């Protein structure tokens, strides 16, 4: 049996590792995805928002979050001052992509700075603007989305100072354009995303197993750092430090961080790969001696959390605001006798991404600004929430905190790689030694 378990563990690890491309191949994929986005996502987003010129500017090591997503894989940062200009011709619908920089920015954005003619970089930008005569010049300023507020004070001030007076009134916030660029997922990205979420699920399954946890010895912090190391060893990155929490009936323990039988474990974890991010929360139960399943009360509490997920997804409708989805979902869940808290958010280029917020843990009445944004198709969300249950023998309500990534398009909303439907068990009954 021990040889079988070791072989099974090695096979699982090998299967997970096989999903990660070498760095050079990753760069190829990232650049292909970016080229596709420039050809498809950008023109549509500019047409939808009515911004015919988008100027994205950053200095090295102080990059606009949007600009970071537009750099080729070989560019880890901007170079000196990098200015990107996207101009959409209203007649043809074609988008011109220019860099007021010393170099081409990858293969998709061509350098357009004649340094002999315009020694001053701002003068070169102004020449491009005057030549094309845009009606609306979008700059990345935003009160509600940090992702769309990336132009810093110095760059904004210098750009406005260089801009001829006739063009100053044409400057507008590029917030809606930046949000659409960041939130819209392409068909190929959605072919890749399931692999990334599957890898996250596999990491959780291994971390919440007897291969990692020995009840009575292993601490929650041990498991946290195992997750962090595992992510790195497999070749992924993470966009936040994982967390592992314990809920238990007996809260009076000499060492409350040591995992013991009867504990309900919770993990919050996310990985980054090919510039996409996951955000997953799941639960596991540590079996007591003689148990082969979680207590019925805990299992039923988990079912209630699944029900809140179902209710939330049923209210996803194109053109409905995040706040409207939140209010309708909470109302229905409470009417069914559930105790929900909903804090769902977009995901994609960022873990907490641009787009409509559907609640926050401390804002169940709605989120001003980002919660007023509307749901649009071809967007991804972390369906994040919890359902509290008052259980006999538990001093405090048990909260089943779930988070799974989903995709929303014209056909509706679906989990990208499924969701947790029941508690993970530790040790796994199927691997128990007879």
Image (tube, grey):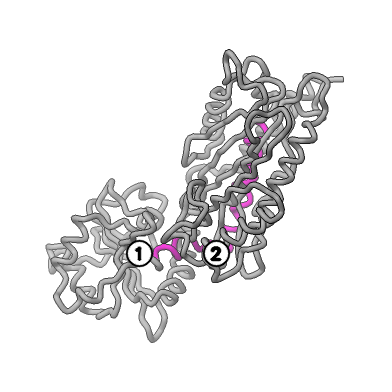
Circle on res. 109? 1
Mark 1 and mark 2 in contact? Answer it, CB < 8 Å: no
Numbered tag placed on residue 80 in the rendering = none
Q: Is residue 187 magenta?
A: yes
Report which residue position mark 2 lands on: 324
Res 230 visible: yes
- Identified at 66% across, 68% down, the residue is 411
Near mark 2 (Cα within 10 A), the count class, few <14, some 14-19 or many ≥20, is: some
Relative image position of residue 47 (x, y in whole percent): 42, 77
Q: What secondary structure is marked by label 2?
A: helix
Judge whether 216 appears above or below 391 on screen: above
| Residue nearer the viewer, 52 or 300 | 300
Give the x, y percent position of residue 247: 63, 29
**For the residue carrying disc 1, how many other residues have a C-alpha within 10 Å: few (<14), some (14-19), or many (20+)?**
many
Magenta span: chief secondary structure: helix
Furthest-top residue in this view = 254
State whether residue 207 appears in this view: no
């Amino acid at each position: 049996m021990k040889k079988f378990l070791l072989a099974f563990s090695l096979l699982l690890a090998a299967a997970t590792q096989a999903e990660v491309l070498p760095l050079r191949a990753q760069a190829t994929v990232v650049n292909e995805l970016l080229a596709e986005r420039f050809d498809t996502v950008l023109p549509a987003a500019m047409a939808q928002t009515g911004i015919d010129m988008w100027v994205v500017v950053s200095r090295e090591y102080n990059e606009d979050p949007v600009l970071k997503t537009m750099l080729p894989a070989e560019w880890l940062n901007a170079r000196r001052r990098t200015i990107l200009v996207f101009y959409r011709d209203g007649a043809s619908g074609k988008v011109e992509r220019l860099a007021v920089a010393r170099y081409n920015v990858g293969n998709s954005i061509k350098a357009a700075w004649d340094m002999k003619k315009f020694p001053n970089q701002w003068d070169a930008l102004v020449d491009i603007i005057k030549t094309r005569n845009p009606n609306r010049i979008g700059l990345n300023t935003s009160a509600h989305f940090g992702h769309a507020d990336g132009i810093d004070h110095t760059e904004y001030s210098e750009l406005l100072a260089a801009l001829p007076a006739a063009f100053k009134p044409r400057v507008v916030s590029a917030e809606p354009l930046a949000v659409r660029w960041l939130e819209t997922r392409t068909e190929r990205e959605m072919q890749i995303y399931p692999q990334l979420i599957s890898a996250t699920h596999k990491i959780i399954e291994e971390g919440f197993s007897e291969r990692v946890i020995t009840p009575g010895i292993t601490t929650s912090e041990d498991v946290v750092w195992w997750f962090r190391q595992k992510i790195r060893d497999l070749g992924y990155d993470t966009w936040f430090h994982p967390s592992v929490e314990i809920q238990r009936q007996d809260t009076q323990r000499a060492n409350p961080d040591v995992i013991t039988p009867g504990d309900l474990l919770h993990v919050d974890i996310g990985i980054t790969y090919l510039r996409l991010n996951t955000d997953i929360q799941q639960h596991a139960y540590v079996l007591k001696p003689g148990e082969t399943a979680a207590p019925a009360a805990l299992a039923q509490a988990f079912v209630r959390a699944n029900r809140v997920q179902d209710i939330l997804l049923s209210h996803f409708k194109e053109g409905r605001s995040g706040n409207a989805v939140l209010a309708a979902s909470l109302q229905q869940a409470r009417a069914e006798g559930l105790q929900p808290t909903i804090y769902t958010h977009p995901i994609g280029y960022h873990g907490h991404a641009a787009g409509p917020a559907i609640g926050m843990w401390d804002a169940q009445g709605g989120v001003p600004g980002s919660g007023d944004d509307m749901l649009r198709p071809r967007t991804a969300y972390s369906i994040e929430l919890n359902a509290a249950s008052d259980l006999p023998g538990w001093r405090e309500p048990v909260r089943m905190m779930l988070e799974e990534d989903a995709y929303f398009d014209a056909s509706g909303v679906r989990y990208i790689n499924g969701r947790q439907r029941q508690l993970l068990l530790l040790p796994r009954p199927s691997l128990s030694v007879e």
